[in-house]
Image (cartoon, rainbow, N blue to C red):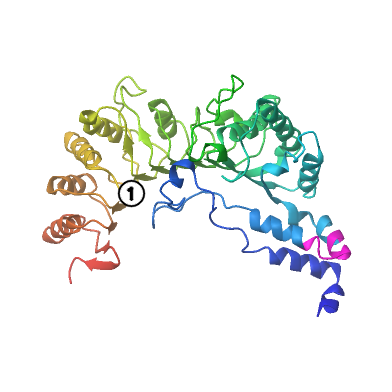
Amino acid sequence: MAAGVQGLPTEILCAIFELSTIGLTTETSHIESRSLTRRRRSTYPIVSGPKPIALPSHKQIFLHCITISHVCKRWRYIAIDLHDLWTRIHLCHNAFISKNYNDSQATETTSMFLSRSANLPLYLDITFALNDPLALSWIQKSRYEENIRRVLLPHIGRCLSLRLVSSDFIVTAVLDVFLERNLSSSPNDIGYTPLSHLHLAKVAPSSRRGGPDSPDHGHGQPIYPPDLSIVAPHLKSLYIDDVQIAVFPRWCLETLFLNNTFISYQNHFHVFMKTRITMLVLHRVTIPGGLPYVRRLIAHHASSVRSLCLSELRCGGPEAEHEDMYTLFFALSLYRTLRELELSGLSQDAMSGLSLMLSANSALVFTDMQKLILRSVKLEATTVADLTTSFPALNELVLERMDEGSDLVNNSWKGNPAIWPELTEIHVDDKMVKRIE
């Protein structure tokens, strides 16, 4: 059998190599963000909700390609010359630093792997696991920054997607390479990086797990939130987990998933009114307090956001002000052009704030709203009445883990034919409930 495979023509072996990588890309990573590690939850917390846009890890497919290239001399020559086999690269800490910090072997090897894809589009996965040694001195950090720049700068001009899971320091160091490349390009220059899909997640260095932060003796460098409008001006899809962003890209961004972070009213206004985002997910996002970015509540004109998911929102500030803060947040987040809305795991203050906002703006009717998903939220009769009045054109309704709230919605819907006339059935947990049994 082995002899038969060895005797196959080169074209057949190339096809076999390419087909063998299908399905190896994992859909989720074993790496969890610092805030999720304590709870041991999945990185995809919204069950059956909007499809997460988190990028998959390329670790398995990359290791598989390396294995193929080590089978025999002939396979190695074929695999190395097959550029398509090396477009998905997984890099960890030893891709940039050898055990001997003065040794350049690590960077030379990494540069070799990146060069194997020639001029083809590149999909990078840079992951520093929690058990990787990241307790670095100031000199070691400088060496890391230098090596990351040396390795990545020649190749990011063809990088279409980047999955970056590491500490603040490494995230900043990698994004700075993209920043340098773009700042050296003139406006509308094709030299801008073509990065269209970006996944940023923060993990704590191993030295900080279970103990206090290590002192840096005054050599620590400040970490500034990245300006993604310069780092990735052509970005279409963005996934953020526990990373603070200063400015979001404007011109091409279509999908945005924010997890375990804070959104200011300035960024809130930017996301809803100054981008092309059509799908927006806010999970465990801390909403802003104080005055909004705009001087007054602007008229609800069109927003590009068509699908909005609000899950387990958090609220800072005095507890007595939470309801008012949620009321203002919903007033600035729900637009008449919205077509799909998901509310998942919201607090009682949040639901009360939503009800207050809807009842205080009776003229605000979401005629384009077609789908409503409610998960693990507490409903009262007044809230149900507000929902039926404000969302009159629903043709799809999903209720999951709603307890008494499901009965309130069902009774209101079945008892009045004028409520959601286009809705013939409701998804309640694992069952379908029809208006007329």
Please give left or right for residue 195 compared with residue 348 in the image.
right
Please give left or right for residue 380 compared with residue 289 in the image.
left
Q: Which image quarter holds the N terminus? A: bottom right
Q: Report the front residue among 225 and 141.
A: 141
Q: Which image quarter holds the C terminus? A: bottom left
Taking the view exactly as shown, the residue that stands out farthest to the left is: 415
Q: Does the rendering let one see residue 187? A: no
- Residue drawn at x 27%, y 34% as measured from the top left: 326
Where in the figure is residue 80, as x and y percent of width and height? 82, 56
Tell me if residue 172 is in the magenta stretch. Answer: no
- Residue drawn at x 14%, y 59% as measured from the top left: 417
Please give left or right for residue 72 compared with residue 310 in the image.
right
Q: Report the front residue among 388 and 104.
A: 104
Taking the view exactly as shown, the residue that stands out farthest to the bottom is: 1
- Residue drawn at x 71%, y 51% as measured from the top left: 87
Can you say whether 435 is above or below 309 in the image?
below
Where in the figure is residue 259, as x and y percent of width and height? 44, 41
Q: Does the rendering let one see residue 308? A: yes
- For disc 1, the neighbor class at 10 Å (few under 14, some 14 to 19, many from 20) is some
Where in the figure is residue 211, as x and y percent of width and height? 49, 36
Q: Quadrant of residue 299?
A: top left
| Residue receiving disc 1 | 342
Check disc 1 and report its element: helix, strand or loop: strand
What amino acid type should be assigned to the residue bearing mark 1?
A: Glu
Q: Quadrant of residue 106?
A: top right
Can you say whether 339 is above or below 48 in the image?
above
Q: Which residues are magenta?
A: 68-77
- Residue drawn at x 76%, y 33% as measured from the top left: 150
Where in the figure is residue 262, as x and y percent of width and height? 41, 33
Magenta stretch secondary structure, dominant? helix
Q: Quadrant of residue 327?
A: top left
